[in-house]
């Protein structure tokens, strides 16, 4: 998952929240990003940081809500990229360190 943020404070707040909620197993912060984009009819230039968030696709909805709640932008970039291949042990670690849905309780029989 990719998320751009305006500053380190926002990056740290989002990363900490996602890790505490187990919505992400790892969040990388990449500084030095210069973003050029069209916003409200103008072309903008802003320094940003890129968050690379390691998670499972099943958590996209919850993760997007958590990011949106903490993000200062009206329309934050929250983009999911599929994992087409990966080292099996790393993928197992990723799964073990993210939230899974609670199992269904047994029926009353």
Image (cartoon, rainbow, N blue to C red):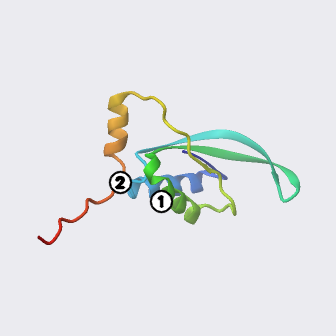
Q: Quadrant of the N terminus?
A: top right
**Residue 30, label in figure:** none
Left or right: 80 as drawn, with respect to 22: right
| Image coords of residue 17 (percent x, y) | 46, 58
Residue lying farthest to the left in this orientation: 109
| Image coords of residue 36 (percent x, y) | 79, 44
Check contact, mark 2 vs mark 1: CB within 8 A: yes
Q: Residue at x 73, y 46 (%)?
A: 47
Q: Residue at x 42, y 53 (%)?
A: 23
The residue tagged 1 is 62
Left or right: 71 as drawn, with respect to 15: right
Q: Residue at x 88, y 54 (%)?
A: 42
Q: Residues within 10 Å of mark 1 (few under 14, many from 20)?
A: few
Q: Residues within 10 Å of mark 2 (few under 14, many from 20)?
A: some
Q: How many badges with numbers are in the image?
A: 2
| Image coords of residue 59 (percent x, y) | 45, 53
Q: Label 2's element?
A: loop
The residue tagged 2 is 99
Compared to 43, does 109 lie above or below?
below
Q: Earlier in the sequence, mark 2 or mark 1?
A: 1
Q: Label 1's element?
A: helix
Q: Residue at x 68, y 60 (%)?
A: 73
Residue lying farthest to the front in this orientation: 109
Cα distance between the residues tagged 2 and 1 = 10 Å
């Amino acid at each position: 998952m990719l998320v751009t943020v305006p500053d380190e404070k926002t990056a740290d707040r989002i990363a900490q929240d996602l890790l505490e909620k187990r919505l992400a197993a790892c969040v990388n912060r990449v500084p030095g990003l210069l973003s050029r984009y069209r916003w409200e009819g103008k072309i903008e230039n802003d320094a940003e940081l890129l968050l690379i968030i390691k998670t499972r696709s099943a958590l996209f909805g919850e993760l997007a809500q958590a990011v949106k709640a903490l993000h200062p932008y009206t329309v934050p970039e929250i983009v999911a990229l599929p994992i087409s291949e990966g080292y099996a042990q790393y993928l197992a670690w990723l799964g073990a360190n993210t939230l899974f849905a609670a199992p269904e309780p047994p029926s009353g029989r």
